[in-house]
Each structure stands twice: as structure tokens, then as C-alpha cells.
């Protein structure tokens, strides 16, 4: 067996109030893809941030190529040849692709403080060629689609000629073709002897790409297994610490009842084109399509977060004017963004404040003073009802795991008596165990008579959860399928049904 | 992939349009202002008056260049006005009291400014004070130091007429040297901002500081450098204002920082960071002085000049916000 590239033992790390890592270990061989899995909050990202010099460990040792090392800063990690691609995109939107990739290592011109932009772009172009990426080095990063930005991040990490490459959920925002592309690059690197750490929630994916899997749970090390010898079911059991059966829950009966929300001929530029649909009481309406098809745009327009050029929105058959989110909330519509941390939560406020944020008026006394006894009771009720895992109501939402944060957002809308809930990628970045809980929650909400629009890029999720499925492509609705007739193939056909016009 | 490419291309185009738009608007506004005042006022359209607009722009223009660097990083520097005063006092004292040669006063003033800027930078980068608060404190510190050093009395350059000549002399085209100093500094600043690593990190900091840090860039050191640059420009401003007044006046300087910030913003520098240019800032500074002098010449009372200038600044910031909204 080849010499170990990385060997971490006894790693512990605490943050104020949280014991993030406890006596963890991890090893990486050259030319190995080592998957790191675990539920949210299991400590995967924290462990890798220790390796990448972003966090300092409290205890433990790190050996790199057999030598004990101290990794004090991201720079130190890079110097050793350890690169990390973060879960959140970490790019400078105002700078170009090439400027982003070589930030901190710019080729110098005639004098050491002068930039050599030509060489910079040439080096980037060279890099893209070896990776077979189609990117313009001079394009401004903020003008790129998310998937392309992800490719920039990957190219940046690879440009360090790293021997260790850590990827924290690199595929979360990518389409299938883009994932194939990424895996091609990963295999290419593996052949060169690079050690790759792959953090992902998509277990199917790990089967495809990884050699070994290390499972973490609650900040601790659980087990390392050969991917080929482990079943997905067994990995999941190790992750959740119990055996769970991923059986499809029964789709609740959809009473083909009254129309709660109707959208007629909604238009906005080229992004939303003549979109019409109905949403019934107690229905889960799935919205499928490729990334950039316009699903989120429709949701945001219906919610009043973005303007629309034309079209009608009817609630219970009556046309309503929704120009702002406040209008939408007044009409009983709630929107749960795919980016919870940015758009769904006041991160530095506590659970209680977040739960009552959208319905504060209900809890105010006559003088406008907040009745804290009532907000507390309401928050308590939601925490219990949704089984929100928080040490207390006074916990800052920032310190909760992704799945728990999602539940807090749901609680916020439930506290506001919302009748129509729009979920945008409700399980993005949420681990398997919490996923089935979110699914159960969606079903419960529908059974209680609430109406749900669920936007999802994961086809199994759409197929499993929806009573009815709308498929979008390029801003139009290209197909509608009932739960009974829907298949992955049919959805993909609609999702790729482009207009017959060929772009120049 | 086809769709995303075409979409992103059209977005790039609109973005570029939005970005150069403000600079174009600013330049257009300057041209319109000059044309308007020239049309309605004979005394405005004289060579002497255009020269005096340029001279009046020099001090604010130089301070505004420093402000541009700081604002591009997403920060703010409220201390440049009083630091300018402090530097002019340092200059005056070195020139008149120490018996040292005149030319030593210039590096002393520049060093003083850079030092104040460096302290700002350390407060912000190392002690993590918000830039607004750190530089607000420094505004008072500099002002107090200027008064202490000068004993609250103006310092006159008696017996040193060569200092005035050095900056206000007119060897070329009848234009005082301060104007050339300003444009020279502008060219240098523009090159630094667009061609050097300092410029690159200035934009990177304002665009995404955390990403820059995680890329292994020593964010703290560069931030301190940027504030030092702003201080350096305040030092240069101190030299120019001392030359214009042929004295160091310890009580001027308050409010200059706001004009500097206004010039940068009118010129298209975004208060949310990541966007800005020296050319735009110079245009912004020219707009402010053209407006001031033009309104005076056509007889608008000072009170109304303030109102009009204020409205221009509000308009410029509003444009900045419109531009950013268009991008989202």
C-alpha cells in the first residue's frame, strides 16, 4: 500500500457552545477518491476546514506525507498542496474568471508589483484546455451561471497543482451532464496520483466515484469502508446510527378540490414566458426542469419578490395584486428559498424571533409592544410540532444544522397561518435522515389542507412527492404530468423541449 | 448549455453597459454643466475661470482618489479631511521652524498622512473596528493634533516664497502646477488601481473579502495598505491646500472628507464595494467644483449651492442603487 498522503488522528475542535469535532481521524492515499459522509452537523466540513488551514484544531495531529505538520492558514495548506473547494461559492463576482483563479498568485509584469494580465489570461486558458472546460478567462464571474461558477472554483483549486483536493458538496448545484464532466476531471486527477476528498449527500454518486467512504456522526468518527464492499443501505445506517428504510411513503390522497391559486399568462422578460397553472387545496405540485429553466423565477414573481410584466394571479378565484412579498404574505403565500441562510432566516437572531418574524403583528399588544409570552408559546408549539432540534428557543439560528434551519423556516410560515407554501429545493444540502423528515412534513402539510408548490432538481424527489408535475424549459411550461403517468424519461423530455429557434 | 451561454452573454453585456453607464452619465453631466454655465454667463466662459475650476478641483480631487481606493474595498474613510489639515501643519512646521530644507517638508507631510492611514488600517483590519467608527475617531484625533502642533495658529511660509511658486507657479500655459500634480497623481493612481496587485486586491476585498482571505491573500496587510494609500493622498492634499493658501490653517479641513466621498460616488464608485475608477472620481470632483463655481458666478446664494450640491450627491447614489438593482 502506498504511503499515506494525509493522516489525521485525535482531531478535536470546539466552537463557543458547540463541540464540533471529537477525537476524529481520517486518512487519504495518493490516487484515491475518499468520500466523507454524514448527516448535516456531523462535522465533515469542519474536519476538512482543519485540514485546509481555515480552522485551528484544539487537539490531535496531522501528518502530511508521513511528516507531522502544522497548518496555520489557508496559505500554508496551499503551500503544502492542499486545496479546498467550499460548499458555498467563494468567488469575487466583480473580477474576471482568470483574476479569480489566480488571486494571490498573479503573474507579475516588468516590476514585482505590476500585473501581467496577458500571461494571467493565457495561463487560465491553458488550465481550461487541460481540463477541457469551456470558459472565457475574461468573463466577469458575476455574469456566469452557478454551474459555470462552480467550474471556476474547481479550476482554481486544480490550478494549485494540488496533491490533495477537498471538494465540499461540489455537485449540489450541477446538472447531470455537468456532474459527468466533474467526474471525468476527478478520474483524470486520480490517475495523476492526486488524493481527493469528496463530501456529498448524494450517496448514489459516491458509489460511482469513490474508492473508500468514511462516515462521521455528531462530530465523531464512525467507520471507514471500501466503497465497493458497502451497500448504500449500510452506509446510511452508519450515518444515522440506526437502520432506516427508505421506502416510498404513500402519497396522500389528493382531493381534486377547489383551486386555491391560479396563475394566468405570467410574463417577465425572457425568463418567464406565458406561464399559467392552477394549484388545488391539499395538493403538492412539483415543478421540475433543468437549472435555469425559470422555476425559481416563477416562484419569486408569484411571491412578489420580483416584478412581472404581465399576467394575473388569482387566489380562491379572485384576482389579486401581488407587487411585494408583503402582499403575498397577506394573501397567505409563503416562499421558502433554496438559499435559506441568505433569504429565509435572520441568522443572528434566535429560534423564537425567527419563528414569529412573518407574523409578528399577531403577537403584538395594542401599543405595538411584543407580547413575549405569546411569541414564546407560539414558537414552543412549532418547535414541538415540527420536532425542531434546538437546545432552546434562545439558540441563534446560525448555530443550527441545515435541516433544522429548514424546519425553522417552515415554522415561520406555519406560525403565519400560510395556506400556500412554495418550497424551492426543500432538501438541498440536507442529509438523508433529515430528508425523509422533510418529506413527511410536506405530506402532513398537504393533508392538513395546505397547498404546496415544490421546486426540485432531483427527479426521484419530484416523482415521489408530487401529485402533479409541471415541467419548465426556458421560461415556458412545456409539460404537465400526473403522478401516475410521470416517469424520469417523460420529465426529461419536457425539460429539454427547447424552442425550434436556434440561438446564433 | 446553449441556453446558459446565451443568457450569460446577454447578462454580461447589460452588466458592462450598466457599469460604464454611470461614468458616461457623469461625463455627460460635466459637459452639460460646463455648456450650460458657459451659455448663460460670459465671465464663466473665460480661460481664467476654467483654470480656477481646475485649481479648485485639485485638493478635493486628490483626497477623492484616496477615498476611491477605500470605498472600492467596501470601506469608508472619514478622516481624510482633518488628516489633510494635520499634514499641512506638519509641512508648515518643518518648513518654517526646523531650519530644514524646504523639500524635506513634502515627504514629512506625506509620511504623516500615510502613518495616520496606517493607524486607521490597523484599527479596521486588526482590531476589527467598523471603518466608519475607526475613521470617525481618527477625524477628531487628527483635528486635535493639528491644533496642538500649531497652537491653533496658522503657520505662514514667511521667507519661503519658493514653496508657493513650486505649486502655484504657472510655467506651462498659465496653469498652476497644482493642476498638473493632480493629474499626475491621477494617472499614477489609475495605474496602481488597474495594473498592480494592490489594485487587484482592492477590488477583490470589496467584491468578496472572505473569498479573498480563503484564497490565501493576506487580507489584513492589504487593507492596512489601502488605508495608508488614502492617508498618503490626504498628505498630498495637505501640501496642495497649504500651497493654495500659502499657509497651514489648522481649522480648515472639516467636511472635505464628505466632498471626497461625494466625488468618488458621483464618479461611479459603488459604496457597496467592488466597483470604481480614478477617471470617474476626477470627473466627479470636477462636477462638484464646476457646480460650485458656476452657481457662484451666476449669483446663486451659498445656501442654495449647498442644497443643489446635496441633491446631486443624492441623485448619484440613487443611480448607483438603480445600477445594482438592475444587476441582481
Image: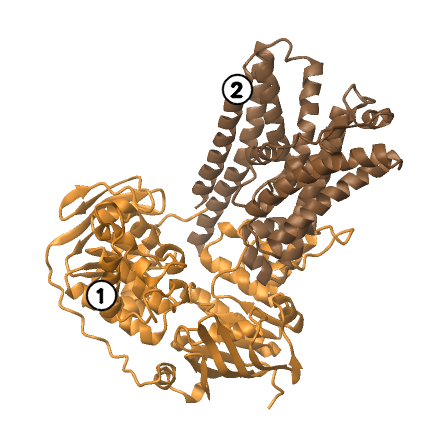
Chain colours: A orange, B brown
Q: Is residue B5 visible?
A: yes
Residue nearer the viewer, B128 or A332: B128
Mark 1 → mark 2, Cα distance in angstroms: 60 Å
Chain of the residue displaying label 2: B
Q: Is residue A486 visible?
A: no
Secondary structure found at label 2: helix
* Position above or below: B156 against A329: above
How far across and how far down the image is residue B222, in percent? 66, 53
Relative placement, left or right, of A129 versus A502 is: right
**What residue do we see at 42% from left, 52% from top?**
B3
Splitting the image into 4 quarters, where does residue B56 fall? top right
How far across and how far down the image is residue A170, in percent? 47, 68
- Residue that badge 2 annotates: B303
**What residue do we see at 59% from left, 17% from top?**
B294
Q: Quarter of the image containing the N terminus of chain B?
A: bottom left
Relative placement, left or right, of A120 versus B313 is: right
Relative placement, left or right, of A367 versus B155 is: left
How far across and how far down the image is residue A303, in percent? 28, 49
Secondary structure found at label 1: helix
Tag on residue A381? Answer: 1
Q: Residues within 10 Å of mark 1 (few under 14, many from 20)?
A: some
Tag on residue A27? Answer: none
Q: Are marks 1 and 2 in contact (CB under 8 Å)?
A: no
Residue nearer the viewer, A392 or A386: A392
How far across and how far down the image is residue B204, in percent? 59, 52
Splitting the image into 4 quarters, where does residue B54 fall? top right
Using the rendered image, report if marks 1 and 2 lie on a common chain.
no
Amino acid at each position: 500500500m502506498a504511503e499515506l498522503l494525509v493522516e489525521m488522528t485525535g482531531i478535536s475542535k470546539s466552537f463557543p457552545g458547540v463541540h464540533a469535532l471529537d477525537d476524529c481521524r481520517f486518512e487519504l492515499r495518493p490516487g484515491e477518491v475518499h468520500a466523507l459522509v454524514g448527516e448535516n452537523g456531523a462535522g465533515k466540513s469542519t474536519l476538512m476546514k482543519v485540514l485546509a488551514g481555515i480552522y485551528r484544531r484544539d487537539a490531535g495531529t496531522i501528518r502530511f506525507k508521513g511528516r507531522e505538520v502544522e497548518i496555520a492558514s489557508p496559505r500554508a495548506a496551499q503551500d503544502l498542496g492542499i486545496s479546498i473547494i467550499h460548499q458555498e461559492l467563494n468567488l469575487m463576482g466583480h473580477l474576471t474568471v482568470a483574476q479569480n483563479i489566480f488571486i494571490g498568485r498573479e503573474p507579475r509584469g516588468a516590476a514585482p508589483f505590476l500585473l501581467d494580465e496577458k500571461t494571467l489570461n493565457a495561463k487560465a486558458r491553458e488550465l481550461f484546455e487541460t481540463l477541457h472546460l469551456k470558459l472565457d478567462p475574461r468573463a466577469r464571474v458575476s455574469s456566469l451561471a452557478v454551474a459555470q461558477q462552480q467550474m471556476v472554483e474547481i479550476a482554481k483549486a486544480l490550478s494549485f497543482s494540488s496533491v490533495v483536493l477537498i471538494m465540499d458538496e461540489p455537485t449540489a448545484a450541477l446538472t447531470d451532464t455537468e456532474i459527468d464532466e466533474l467526474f471525468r476531471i476527478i478520474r483524470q486527477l486520480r490517475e495523476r496520483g492526486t488524493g481527493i476528498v469528496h463530501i456529498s449527500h448524494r450517496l448514489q454518486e459516491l458509489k460511482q466515484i469513490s474508492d473508500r467512504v468514511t462516515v462521521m456522526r455528531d462530530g465523531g468518527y464512525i467507520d471507514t469502508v471500501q466503497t465497493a464492499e458497502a451497500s448504500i443501505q449500510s452506509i446510511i445506517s452508519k450515518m444515522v446510527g440506526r437502520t432506516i428504510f427508505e421506502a416510498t411513503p404513500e402519497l396522500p390522497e389528493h382531493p381534486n378540490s377547489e383551486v386555491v391559486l391560479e396563475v394566468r399568462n405570467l410574463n417577465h422578460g425572457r425568463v418567464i414566458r406565458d406561464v399559467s397553472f392552477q394549484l388545488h387545496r391539499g395538493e403538492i405540485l412539483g415543478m421540475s426542469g433543468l437549472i435555469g429553466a425559470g422555476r425559481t423565477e416563477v416562484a419569486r414573481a408569484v411571491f412578489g419578490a420580483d416584478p412581472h410584466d404581465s399576467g394575473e394571479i388569482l387566489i380562491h378565484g379572485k384576482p389579486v395584486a401581488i407587487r411585494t412579498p408583503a402582499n403575498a404574505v397577506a394573501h397567505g403565500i409563503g416562499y421558502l428559498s433554496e438559499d435559506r441562510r441568505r433569504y429565509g432566516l435572520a441568522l443572528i437572531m434566535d429560534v423564537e424571533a425567527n419563528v414569529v418574524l412573518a407574523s409578528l403583528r399577531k403577537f403584538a399588544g395594542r401599543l405595538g409592544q411584543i407580547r413575549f409570552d405569546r411569541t414564546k408559546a407560539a414558537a414552543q408549539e412549532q418547535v414541538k410540532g415540527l420536532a425542531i432540534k434546538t437546545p432552546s428557543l434562545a439558540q441563534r439560528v446560525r448555530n443550527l444544522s441545515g435541516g433544522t434551519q429548514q424546519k425553522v423556516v417552515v415554522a415561520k410560515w406555519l406560525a403565519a397561518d400560510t395556506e400556500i407554501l412554495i418550497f424551492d429545493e426543500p432538501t438541498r444540502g440536507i442529509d438523508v435522515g433529515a430528508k425523509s423528515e422533510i418529506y413527511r412534513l410536506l405530506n402532513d402539510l398537504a393533508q392538513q389542507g395546505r397547498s404546496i408548490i415544490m421546486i426540485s432538481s432531483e427527479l426521484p424527489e419530484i416523482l415521489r412527492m408530487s401529485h402533479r408535475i409541471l415541467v419548465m424549459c426556458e421560461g415556458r411550461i412545456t409539460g404537465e404530468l400526473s403522478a401516475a403517468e410521470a416517469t424520469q424519461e417523460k420529465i426529461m423530455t419536457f425539460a429539454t423541449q427547447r424552442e425550434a429557434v436556434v440561438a446564433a | 448549455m446553449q441556453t446558459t451561454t446565451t443568457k450569460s452573454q446577454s447578462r454580461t453585456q447589460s452588466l458592462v453597459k450598466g457599469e460604464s453607464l454611470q461614468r458616461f452619465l457623469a461625463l455627460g453631466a460635466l459637459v452639460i454643466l460646463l455648456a450650460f454655465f458657459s451659455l448663460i454667463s460670459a465671465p464663466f466662459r473665460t480661460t481664467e475661470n476654467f483654470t480656477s475650476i481646475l485649481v479648485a478641483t485639485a485638493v478635493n480631487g486628490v483626497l477623492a482618489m484616496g477615498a476611491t481606493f477605500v470605498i472600492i474595498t467596501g470601506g469608508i474613510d472619514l478622516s481624510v479631511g482633518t488628516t489633510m489639515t494635520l499634514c499641512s501643519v506638519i509641512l508648515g512646521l518643518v518648513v518654517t521652524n526646523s531650519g530644514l530644507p524646504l523639500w524635506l517638508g513634502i515627504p514629512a507631510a506625506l509620511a504623516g498622512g500615510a502613518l495616520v492611514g496606517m493607524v486607521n488600517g490597523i484599527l479596521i483590519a486588526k482590531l476589527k473596528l467598523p471603518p466608519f467608527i475607526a475613521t470617525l475617531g481618527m477625524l477628531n484625533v487628527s483635528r486635535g493634533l493639528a491644533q496642538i502642533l500649531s497652537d491653533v495658529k496658522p503657520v505662514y511660509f514667511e521667507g519661503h516664497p519658493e514653496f508657493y511658486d513650486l505649486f502655484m507657479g504657472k510655467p506651462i500655459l498659465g496653469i498652476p502646477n497644482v493642476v498638473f500634480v493632480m493629474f499626475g497623481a491621477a494617472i499614477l493612481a489609475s495605474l496602481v488601481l488597474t495594473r498592480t496587485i494592490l489594485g487587484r486586491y482592492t477590488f477583490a476585498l470589496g467584491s468578496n473579502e472572505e473569498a479573498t482571505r480563503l484564497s490565501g491573500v493576506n487580507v489584513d496587510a492589504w487593507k492596512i495598505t489601502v488605508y495608508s494609500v488614502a492617508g498618503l493622498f490626504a498628505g498630498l492634499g495637505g501640501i496642495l491646500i497649504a500651497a493654495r493658501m500659502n499657509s497651514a490653517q489648522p481649522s480648515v479641513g472639516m467636511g472635505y472628507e464628505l466632498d471626497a466621498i461625494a466625488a468618488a460616488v458621483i464618479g461611479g464608485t459603488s459604496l457597496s464595494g467592488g466597483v470604481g475608477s480614478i477617471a470617474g472620481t476626477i470627473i466627479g470632483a470636477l462636477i462638484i467644483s464646476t457646480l460650485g463655481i458656476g452657481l457662484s458666478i451666476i449669483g446663486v446664494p451659498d445656501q442654495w449651492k449647498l442644497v443643489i450640491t446635496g441633491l446631486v450627491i443624492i441623485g448619484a447614489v440613487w443611480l448607483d442603487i438603480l445600477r445594482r438593482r438592475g444587476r441582481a
